Amino acid sequence: MNLDETAARLGAPVADVERVHRLAGDRPSAPLPARADAPAILDRLAVRPDDAAEIMAGWPDPDSPLWTPELRWLLDRTIALVRADLGGYGWLAPGPELPRDRGPAWRHLYVYAYLALVDVVRAYHRAHGVADAVSWATLADLGRNLAIDRRMRGEGWPVMQAWLTLHVRGSLYELGRLQHHRSDSAIELHIPDAGPLTPEAVSASLDAARAFFPRHFPDERYAAFACGSWLLDPQLREYLPADSNIIRFQRRFELEPYQEPDGPDADVEVLRFVFRTLSTPLDALPRRTVLQRAAVDHLTAGRHWQWRRGRFPI
Ligand SMILES: CC(C)(COP(=O)(O)OP(=O)(O)OC[C@H]1O[C@@H](n2cnc3c(N)ncnc32)[C@H](O)[C@@H]1OP(=O)(O)O)[C@@H](O)C(=O)NCCC(=O)NCCS
């Protein structure tokens, strides 16, 4: 197989295609669910009807003309690449970014990979005694992300395609309000877009994690909860009331000193999570909530948001 040609046909950098080839090697892939079972599975994964219709329209049937040999190669090898790291918890790019406007096969290739890995990770969950309800609640982040990606007109997808490999490698668990991510020494917290972040819901989710990890991952020892987020930027205190959920969430954490970002650019992340757009000019963004007004006014004043990391003991 000629990787240069494959990359050109995929519209992707050669280095990204070489990386897939190297990491996946000849490791085992996994089959997609049967087409007839897919609608019910998509429903369990909270995929909305408009996204489900697109996914079904691009389904990689063996005789589908939408699936070129390059796309079939990438689908098969990205499944193998992610599967090879089952149980791993680092961020993992499943493959190159694709030109997603070329139709449903291109648009949803990494969704088909996710669907192929559902059975694989469900077996991993069962081996760790994870309840079905937790398994499905965790995996249903797919539907949430597809809906957000639709709102974002595709701008959100490059991050999401890597994010969603955490779920299918068994590294992330949605326990009530928060997602809990296994990592080296701390449980990393992620906050899905799922309604208000009330202190009660946060406390309940932390309690659930305190019970969950010793029970299902007894060989792993966690001394702290940790988080990296725009939500931990102390500058938000200049704008949000002290009793707002975000400020109350912040108070749980001891912040690490601020370092010039080696993580995500917080200005971009604020636009992503507050406005669900990365490209709208500041003066065209909505100003409906106190946070929206703060986000715009801060940037318009030439200031910057900070991506901050913090932790607190378990
Ligand atoms: C985290 C989150 C649930 C907090 O929402 P919340 O519980 O309503 O937060 P607060 O009580 O602190 O809100 C204070 C104010 O900011 C507004 N606000 C909070 N989050 C907002 C958001 N994402 N977009 C727009 N406005 C928001 C609230 O409406 C409120 O304003 P108002 O009094 O004018 O109505 C919410 O921001 C969210 O869903 N974010 C997306 C996910 C995310 O950012 N995850 C972290 C990724 S690193």
Image (cartoon, helix red, strand yellow):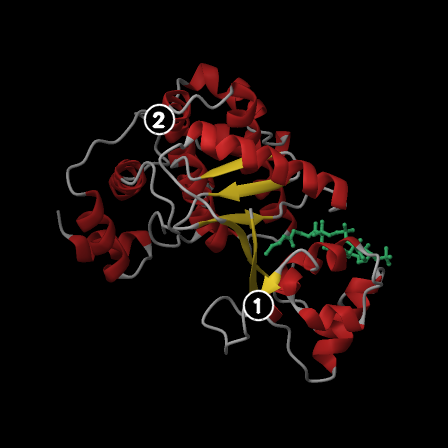
Q: Which sits earlier in the primary sequence, circle 2 or circle 1? A: 2
Quadrant of ligand 1: it is bottom right
Residue 286 seen in this snapshot = no
Look at 75% across and 72% down and name the residue there: 296
Q: How many marks?
A: 2
Along the horizontal axis of the image, is 277 left or right of 219? right
Amino acid at circle 1 = Trp
Q: Is residue 314 above or below residue 119?
A: below
User: Where is residue 96 drawn, in percent x and y?
Assistant: 34, 54
Which residue is depicted at the point 42% across and 53% down? 99
Q: Position of residue 116 (x, y in %)?
A: 37, 28
- Determine the residue located farthest toward the left in the rendered image: 1
Determine whether 227 is above or below 238 in the image: above
Residue 154: x and y, percent? 55, 52
**SS at mark 2 in the image:** helix
In whole angstroms, how far apart are the C-alphas of marks 2 and 1? 34 Å
Q: Which mark is residue 120?
A: 2
**Image location (x, y in percent) of residue 233:** 65, 68
Q: 28 or 188, which lies in front? A: 188
Residue at horizontal 34 percent and vertical 42 percent from the top: 88
User: Which is more foreground, mark 2 or mark 1?
Assistant: 1
- In the picture, measured across the screen, residue 234 lies left or right of residue 210, that is right
Query: Which residue is tagged 1?
Result: 307
Residue 282's label in the rendered image is none
> Looking at the image, which residue sits at the far top?
36
